[in-house]
Image (cartoon, rainbow, N blue to C red):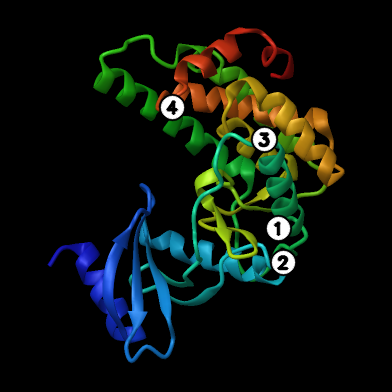
């Protein structure tokens, strides 16, 4: 029995689950849908967090965000195996591309709610300034992998040559934050799921810091690349926040997206960066 199977079996026994089947969990988790034996509890989701030690932070964030009504409901956690038991969201489809007005509205609504949550003192969340270097290192690792795997030695160059400037901007913005909040930390399309009457956020990568960071992160990820700066400003305006600051964070994360070099629209993303508009925000 491999490690994932062992952890899943422990969850099935602890929470009386049956019929477990895999869902798309990305690279940071193994995720399964399961039924509660006897049918009395409906269907739930088991998330095996990777690495397992990060389950506590995610659980603490979901608990803090629970009062906002903007995140998936955490039912229970088993930190001995790094597992979270979550409510199943239906239909659970991610926020689609192609409608920037809807995306802006949904993002602003959820982030406004999330950022109202009090930062709990019961868990030692890392700060954005503390976590940023790891994100920068990951961008470099991803760049090397994509170049090697695709045999494209110049792929992601537009982001790579601006990565140092993005880092300096990020540290400046972190130092100038006057109202740190509990950030979602991975607020992108795939982590914004449709419910029967709206949307909920899932899979936080929590840290504390500048609320404009979450705006910029979403704006940089959501296509098309040609609308990143406009999108960041529009979300900030809906939230009553600083549009210039949101655009600066969007520029930081656009550099990371380009450097990571995995996107389907890589050419458009790199062209947008090389167009010069982002450089003025770095």
* Residue at image coords 52%, 62%: 58
Q: CA distance from mark 1 to mark 3?
A: 21 Å
The answer to which image quadrant residue 188 occupies is top right
Which of the two labelled residues, at mark 4 and mark 2, occupies the earlier sequence position? Answer: 2
Which of the two labelled residues, at mark 4 and mark 1, occupies the earlier sequence position? Answer: 1
Q: CA distance from mark 4 to mark 1?
A: 27 Å
The residue that label 2 is drawn on is 68
The residue that label 3 is drawn on is 100
Report helix, strand or loop for mark 1.
helix
Dot 3: few (<14), some (14–19), or many (≥20) neighbours within 10 Å?
A: some
Which of the two labelled residues, at mark 3 and mark 4, occupies the earlier sequence position? Answer: 3
* Nearer-the-camera pick, 258 or 222: 222
Which of the two labelled residues, at mark 2 and mark 1, occupies the earlier sequence position? Answer: 2
The residue that label 4 is drawn on is 263
* Nearer-the-camera pick, 169 or 33: 33
Q: Nearer the viewer, mark 3 or mark 4?
A: 3
Quadrant of the drawing holding the N terminus: bottom left
Say whether residue 13 is left or right of residue 199: left
């Amino acid at each position: 029995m491999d490690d994932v199977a062992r952890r899943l079996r422990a969850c099935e026994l602890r929470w009386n689950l049956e019929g477990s089947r895999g869902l798309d969990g990305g690279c940071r988790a193994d995720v399964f849908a399961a039924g509660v034996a006897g049918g009395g509890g409906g269907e739930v989701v088991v998330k095996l967090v990777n690495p397992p030690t990060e389950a506590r932070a995610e659980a603490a964030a979901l608990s803090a965000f629970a009062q906002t009504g903007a995140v998936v409901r955490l039912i229970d956690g088993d930190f001995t195996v790094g597992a979270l038991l979550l409510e199943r969201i239906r239909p659970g489809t991610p926020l689609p591309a192609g409608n920037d007005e809807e995306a802006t509205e949904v993002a602003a609504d959820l982030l406004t709610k999330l950022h109202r949550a009090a930062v709990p003192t019961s868990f030692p969340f890392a700060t954005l300034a503390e976590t940023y270097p790891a994100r920068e290192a990951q961008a470099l690792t991803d760049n090397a992998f994509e170049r090697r795997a695709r045999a494209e030695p110049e792929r992601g160059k537009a982001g790579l040559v601006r990565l140092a400037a993005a880092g300096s901007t990020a540290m400046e913005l972190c130092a100038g934050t006057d109202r740190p909040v509990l950030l979602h930390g991975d607020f992108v399309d795939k982590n914004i799921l449709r419910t029967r009457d709206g949307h909920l956020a899932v899979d936080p990568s929590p840290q504390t810091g500048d609320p404009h960071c979450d705006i910029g992160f979403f704006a940089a990820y959501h296509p098309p690349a040609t609308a990143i700066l406009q999108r960041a400003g529009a979300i900030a305006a809906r939230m009553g926040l600083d549009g210039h600051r949101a655009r600066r964070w969007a520029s930081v994360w656009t550099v990371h997206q380009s450097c990571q070099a995995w996107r389907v629209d890589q050419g458009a993303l790199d062209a947008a960066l090389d167009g010069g508009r982002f450089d003025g925000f770095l």
